[in-house]
Amino acid sequence: MAGLLLPALSRAKEKSKQTSCLNNLRQMGLATFLYADDYKDVLPPPFFDPDLLPGNGPFYSYLLFGWGGTVGKPAEPKRAVNLGLLYTGNYLQAPQIFYCPSSRQQKWFRVVFEKKYFESDKVPWPMYAVDGQVNMTYNYFPQQDLPSKKESEAKRGWSQVAHKQTELSSQRSMVTDLIYTWGTMAHTSGKNPYGINALWGDGHVKFSTTKDAFDPKLWGGTGPNPTTETPGDNETKWRTIVSLLRP
């Protein structure tokens, strides 16, 4: 009997976590739209913006604060980026919203994502860690439903970055679960071997299983280890995955 109950309980627990994650994304969407309303349609500037900031890689999209802070010290409002601006601007004050409860980070990763790494007994969240930054377990990359202005990127199916709320599309993601390695996808199971939760440009949230976006070749294989071939450290693969995602 226990052999039958345990898998069912495990599935129910994960389903609850997935729902909590979707609620996190929904709250981020509402807060982002409030921000845009106050800033004349302008979205929180994405720190990963290949056209405006060509030196920044996809790993800039999971930052809330940084870089440049002192590890172990409180994060400074002046270093807020991406959705960290929602926190410093009092649009989103609950820290746990920035963290998926199903995060599958490996304990030995040098770059950490979970909330517990950005707080201590002496310093509450947000606290600088890693290289003087505060991370979240989501990627912020608002997209338009328009092909890139660069022909080489358009041929890959890449879209333009959205800088205003009115440029967003219901068919393009704005915030997603962490896209890092296959093995760190948060909500996979035997029933759902691949897929990620996403906030779409019109504010709705949905688990995406767009088949082409989950070709293991784009993810550098199906393991958890980050390499130069996994999307978290490979701009070409990361942007291809994000551009392929659909609700």
Image (cartoon, rainbow, N blue to C red):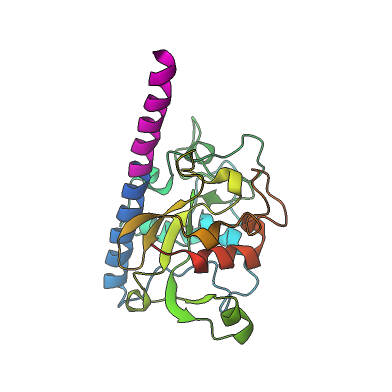
Is any part of residue 101 visible from this angle? yes
Q: Is residue 162 visible?
A: no
**Residue at x-position 66% and y-position 36%:** 108
State the quadrant of the C terminus: bottom left
Give the image quarter of residue 105. Answer: top right
How many numbered marks have been drawn onto this rendered protein structure? Answer: 0
Q: Position of residue 129 (x, y in %)?
A: 59, 44
| Magenta highlight range | 1-19
Task: Tell me if residue 206 comes above or below residue 200 in the rendering.
Answer: above
Question: Does the segment drawn in magenta span residue 5?
Answer: yes
Residue shown at the point (34%, 42%) measured from the top left: 20
- Residue 191 rendering spot, x and y as whole percentages: 45, 40
Q: Nearer the viewer, residue 212 or 156?
A: 212
Q: Is residue 33 left or right of residue 150?
A: left
Q: Residue at x 54, y 45 (%)?
A: 113
Name the residue furthest top: 1
Where residue 148 sits: x, y (%)?
A: 53, 81
| Residue 106 image point, x, y percent | 61, 37
Instruction: Please indicate whether residue 237 sits to the left or right of residue 102 in the image.
Output: right
Relative to 138, residue 186 above or below: above
Q: Quadrant of residue 66?
A: bottom right
For the point 55% across and 56% down, which residue is it? 214
Q: Which quadrant of the rendered structure holds the N terminus? A: top left
Query: Which secondary structure is most common in the magenta stretch?
Result: helix
